Image (cartoon, rainbow, N blue to C red):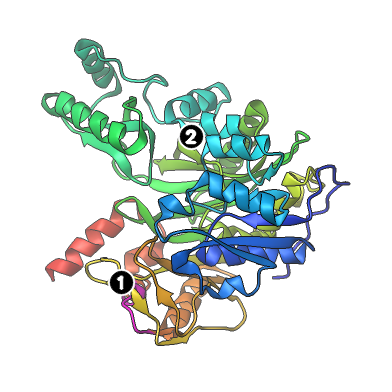
């Protein structure tokens, strides 16, 4: 499918160079988007990434600190200094690291630079799960049953809230994410212990002990709505994704569109997401995440950044989401309406991780041989090559394998073939695990919930 070009009005926030405050495949992906738009790139790195291949394709490649992420990719002062010294007029945070850090977005603005993402206020509002839920309820977005306020310290009030919601309930950290800071409570006797443990975990992991409580859904699917909004009040939603294949709350496989969901409920929730963006003044790309059960959608959070799984939406819509994100940051107005957004065919993404396929323990080392699949409808987003040294300092993601075909069945077959064609030697990867998953009959049916993969893994380990 050929790419659809997003038409835009005249710019009013021009910049000539973008500093990419990230690493790995997403740094390379942003580089390519910038270069296609005629923008120069400044890419930062840590000492561990000095020899990264994407350094050669950047106009400027700067080492800003030691291998530790806290002293390099999370070092706000070093990143801002690199932008000033290199002459970059904008900073793209990618995903992870500082991409959803409101303080960093504000610091970028105060430095006279453009943050390629939403403003600090939007990040702060949607980054706190309680304020996000309150904003979504006000905008008419369906939410998981439970109050949009923090849990009080009063034991009786907490017990009353749980009783009104109905067990099982889930306790969540207001500032949480990545599957941390949450506990399921199935009966009243264990409620206060779960709250105490989660509150301390939240304090240590997120710097805030604030918690909230919601109904725990038994067999939901994880459905996402991708949005794109400019600074002129225009907003569109770019279809939907299913990210239910998760291990320990971490996504493994994503697909677009989500199979088996009628178009009318999707349209309604998509429009609600767009209206919510208008109400909170959101701009840039973003993703609304929902649990979907028994035909109903329940909002759980919004990611105020580019998603790892954005390629499946690019493959089905034909839009370059990264380029659109940059154009919005330049102040351009979208010249594309909702009626022009089409979803064509079906796409899958597999996250290729440097980890043991049985234990999922990280695997560092040197890639001694690498052969990647190719052909129509096959895309590989990666920064690694033969001789690349996989570092133990960062996330284990080393590549994303994406396929696109006319139907879901054809896309699954294409992914099976693509996974069979990969050769990656020297380190352990999750490729054997992914190959087995795409042979699973239940997954092929397209209605597995967020708990399915954990159960599937337990059954495999027991056999």
Mark closest to the chain's N terminus, 1 or 2? 2
At mark 2, the secondary structure is helix
Instruction: Indicate left or right for 267 with 350 as reference.
Output: right
For the N terminus, give its image quadrant.
bottom right
> On the rendered image, what quadrant is the C terminus found in?
bottom left
Residue 127 circle label: 2
Please determine whether, in this image, residue 326 is positioned above or below residue 374: above
Q: Is residue 347 magenta?
A: no
Q: Is residue 276 above or below residue 259?
A: above
Q: Is residue 430 magenta?
A: yes
| Residue 350 visible here | no
Query: Which tag is nearer the camera, tag 1 or tag 2?
Result: 1
In the depicted structure, whether residue 76 falls above or below residue 150? below
Q: Left or right: where does residue 43 sit relative to residue 177?
A: right
Name the foreground residue: 430 vs 66: 66
In the image, 84 versus 30, the foreground residue is: 84
Q: Tell which of 394 and 316 is nearer to you.
A: 394
Residue 308: x and y, percent? 51, 57
Q: Which numbered tag is attached to residue 170?
A: none
Answer above or below: position of 441 versus 426: above
Question: Which picture quadrant has residue 220?
Answer: top left
> In the image, residue 382 lies at what x, y percent?
52, 72
Q: Name the mark on residue 363.
A: 1
Q: Position of residue 289 (x, y in %)?
A: 48, 42
Query: At numbered mark 1, what does the secondary structure look like: helix, strand or loop?
Result: loop
Residue at horizontal 29 percent and vertical 56 percent from the top: 452
- Disc 1 packing (10 Å; few <14; some 14–19; many ≥20): some
Is residue 200 among the parts visible in the rendering?
yes
User: What span is colored magenta in the figure?
Assistant: 425-433
């Amino acid at each position: 499918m050929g790419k659809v070009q997003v038409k835009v009005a005249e710019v009013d926030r021009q910049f000539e160079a973008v500093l990419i405050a990230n690493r790995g495949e997403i740094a390379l992906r942003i580089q390519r988007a910038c270069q296609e738009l005629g923008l120069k790139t400044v890419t930062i790195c840590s000492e561990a990434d000095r020899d990264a291949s994407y350094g050669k394709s950047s106009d400027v490649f700067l080492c800003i600190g030691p291998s530790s992420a806290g002293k390099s990719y999370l070092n706000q002062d070093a990143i801002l200094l690199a932008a000033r010294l290199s002459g970059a007029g904008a900073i793209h945070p990618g995903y992870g690291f500082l991409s959803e850090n409101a303080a960093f977005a504000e610091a970028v603005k105060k430095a006279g630079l453009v943050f390629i993402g939403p403003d600090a206020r939007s990040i702060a509002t949607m980054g706190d799960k309680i304020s996000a839920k309150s904003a979504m309820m006000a905008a008419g977005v369906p939410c998981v049953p439970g109050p949009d306020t923090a849990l009080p310290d009063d034991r009786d009030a907490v017990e009353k809230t749980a009783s009104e919601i109905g067990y099982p309930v889930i306790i969540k950290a207001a500032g949480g994410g990545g599957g941390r800071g949450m506990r399921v409570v199935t009966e009243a006797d264990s409620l206060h212990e779960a709250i105490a443990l989660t509150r301390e975990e939240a304090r240590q992991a997120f710097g805030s002990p604030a918690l909230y409580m919601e109904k725990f859904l038994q067999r939901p699917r994880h459905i996402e709505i991708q949005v794109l909004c400019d600074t002129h009040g225009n907003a569109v939603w770019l279809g939907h994704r299913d990210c239910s294949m998760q291990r320990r709350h971490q996504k493994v496989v994503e697909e677009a569109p989500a199979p088996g969901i009628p178009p009318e409920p999707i349209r309604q929730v998509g429009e609600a997401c767009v209206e919510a963006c208008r109400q909170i003044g959101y701009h840039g790309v973003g993703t609304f995440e929902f649990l979907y059960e028994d035909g109903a959608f329940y909002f759980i959070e919004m990611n105020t950044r580019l998603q790892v799984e954005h390629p499946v939406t690019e493959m089905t819509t034909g839009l370059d989401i990264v380029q659109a994100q940059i154009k919005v940051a330049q102040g351009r107005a979208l010249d594309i309406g909702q009626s022009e957004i089409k979803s064509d065919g079906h796409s899958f993404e597999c996250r290729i991780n440097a980890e043991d396929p049985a234990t999922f323990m990280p695997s560092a080392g040197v890639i001694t041989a690498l052969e990647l699949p190719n052909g129509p409808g096959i895309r590989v987003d990666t920064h690694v090559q033969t001789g690349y040294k996989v570092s133990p300092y960062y996330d284990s993601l080393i590549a994303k394998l994406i396929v696109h075909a006319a139907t879901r069945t054809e896309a699954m077959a294409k992914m099976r073939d693509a996974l069979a064609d990969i050769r990656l030697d020297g380190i352990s990867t999750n490729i054997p695990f992914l190959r087995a998953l795409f042979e699973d009959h239940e997954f092929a049916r397209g209605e597995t919930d967020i708990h399915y993969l954990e159960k599937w893994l337990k059954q495999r380990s027991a056999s």
